[in-house]
């Protein structure tokens, strides 16, 4: 499947998920509004019945005024006379219970003569004995010129939400499905990217192996010719070519086998006391010829007071070799490489600075991935499998250290490798 098709699938999937989310939000809000209206209707009917009952007890023949609702959770009923608090409370609880309104409420009685709320109480519907004078949030004051009582539901929204179990459950399930879908899509994209990188690796490895094999084949044929057989200089020359190319093949095979061991979790570190400065100097000595052939140089500033750490010498050498090899390969001019060391409280930092092509911020997050190679545009003169930095990071992590990169495109790179004592 090509990238364009994947982009279309991702776009359609994103639009579908967005549509499902919007639809779910719409219906949840719709369900909440229905529950809210149902609650208000039940409270209105209950309060009308309470008002009617109070008028009967007071032998008041006047018409019952409609229940007002100044706020979503506040209801007001106007009366012609003062009210007895406990009578009102008992009537409210009775009517609410008959209509399955089991939400806690607060009521207050307003006296127009004193222009104040003369009584207020917070009522727990589930426990008639557990009462308190008022809640933390008292009911609002209704600006009226007569007696009235107000009923306030502080937790009305929570009460309605608790009655929407099926909607909350479906929303949670939807969120889980979306998260799982997003995770699955991410895994698919990562797997596709890894598959592409593996294909690039296989193609590159085939090309890398083909060159030395061809050179060995040609050199072997030349050695078998009769006219070459008698010339010791030519025999030595072709034998040396075969030896060099065989060593090159061996190195490449070892890199691939190292990755196989890493994937199988078979990294075994043979730790001992290692002098980091000695390892750096030995590695530089082996690579200076290549650097000098390119007209460059390697400088050292090994200032760490304590260069001795517990490490695997072979793997530590490979870390420095890989970083130096990258610095040489990605140089666009004679390579200039500087190696520094410094101590921290718990270890040593090895810094390798180069003057290469640099690495842009966009791709820095990928450079330690297996098979990933820094793109060099249309120029394909950089050899490698894309395993070097992955190996460096894996071995550094195995030593309980870390590696940090500072780089800008066109301005070279600096790798800082921290290794604990």
Image: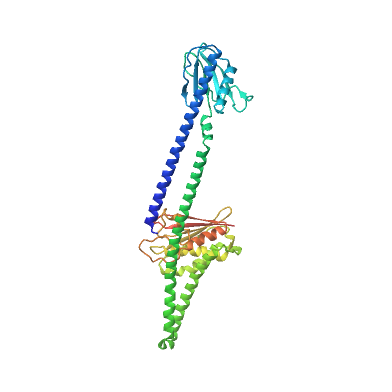
- Taking the spot 47% from the left edge, 15% from the top edge, the residue there is 144
| Residue 314 locus on image (x, y percent) | 56, 66
Position of 222 relative to 44 (above/below): below
Q: Which quadrant of the structure image shows residue 375?
A: bottom left
Q: Quadrant of the N terminus?
A: bottom left
| Residue 226, visible in the rendered structure | yes
Q: Total label count?
A: 0
| Residue 23 locus on image (x, y percent) | 43, 41
Position of 228 relative to 159 (above/below): below
Foreground of the two, 30 or 204 = 30
Q: Is residue 275 left or right of residue 288?
A: right
Foreground of the two, 219 or 253 = 253
Q: Which quadrant of the structure image shows residue 123?
A: top right
| Residue 292 locus on image (x, y percent) | 43, 68
Position of 414 relative to 75 (above/below): below
| Residue 291, visible in the rendered structure | no
Foreground of the two, 172 or 36 = 36
Position of 44 relative to 261 (above/below): above
Foreground of the two, 97 or 341 = 97
Q: Quadrant of the C terminus?
A: bottom right
| Residue 417 locus on image (x, y percent) | 52, 57
Of all residues shown, which one is farthest toward the left?
378
Q: Is residue 58 left or right of residue 354?
A: right
């Amino acid at each position: 499947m090509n990238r364009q098709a994947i982009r279309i699938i991702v776009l359609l999937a994103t639009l579908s998920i967005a549509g499902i989310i919007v639809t779910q939000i719409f219906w949840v809000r719709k369900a909440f509004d229905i529950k809210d209206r149902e609650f208000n209707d039940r409270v209105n009917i209950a309060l009308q019945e309470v008002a009617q009952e109070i008028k009967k007890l007071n032998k008041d023949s006047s018409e019952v005024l409609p229940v007002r609702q100044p706020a979503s959770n506040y209801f007001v009923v106007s009366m012609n006379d003062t009210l007895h608090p406990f009578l009102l409370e008992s009537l409210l609880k009775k009517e609410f219970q008959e209509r399955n309104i089991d939400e806690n409420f607060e009521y207050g009685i307003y006296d127009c003569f004193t222009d104040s709320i003369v009584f207020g109480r917070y009522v727990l519907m589930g426990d008639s004995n557990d009462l308190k004078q008022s809640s933390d949030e008292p009911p609002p004051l209704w600006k009226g010129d007569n007696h009235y009582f107000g009923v306030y539901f502080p937790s009305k929204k929570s009460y309605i939400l608790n009655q929407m179990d099926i909607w909350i459950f479906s929303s949670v399930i939807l969120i889980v499905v979306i998260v799982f879908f997003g995770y699955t899509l991410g895994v698919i994209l990562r797997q596709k990217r890894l598959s592409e990188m593996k294909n690039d690796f296989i193609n590159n490895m085939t090309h890398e192996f083909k060159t030395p094999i061809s050179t060995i084949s040609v050199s072997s044929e030349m050695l078998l010719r009769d006219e070459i057989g008698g010339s010791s200089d030519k025999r030595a020359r072709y034998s040396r070519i075969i030896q060099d190319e065989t060593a090159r093949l061996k190195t490449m095979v070892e890199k691939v086998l190292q990755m196989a061991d890493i994937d199988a979790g078979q990294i075994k570190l043979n730790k001992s006391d290692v002098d980091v400065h000695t390892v750096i100097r030995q590695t530089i000595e082996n690579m200076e010829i290549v650097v000098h052939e390119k007209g460059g140089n390697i400088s050292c500033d090994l200032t760490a007071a304590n260069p001795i750490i517990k490490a695997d010498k072979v793997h530590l050498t490979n870390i420095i070799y890989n970083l130096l090899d990258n610095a040489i390969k990605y140089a666009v001019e004679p390579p200039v490489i500087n190696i520094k060391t410094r101590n921290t409280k718990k270890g040593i930092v090895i810094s390798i600075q180069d003057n290469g092509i640099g690495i842009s911020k966009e791709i820095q997050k990928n450079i330690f991935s297996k098979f990933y190679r820094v793109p060099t545009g249309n120029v394909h003169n950089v050899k490698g499998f894309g395993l070097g930095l992955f190996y460096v990071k894996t071995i550094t992590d195995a030593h309980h250290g870390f590696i940090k990169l500072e780089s800008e495109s066109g301005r070279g790179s600096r790798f800082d490798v921290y290794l604990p004592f």
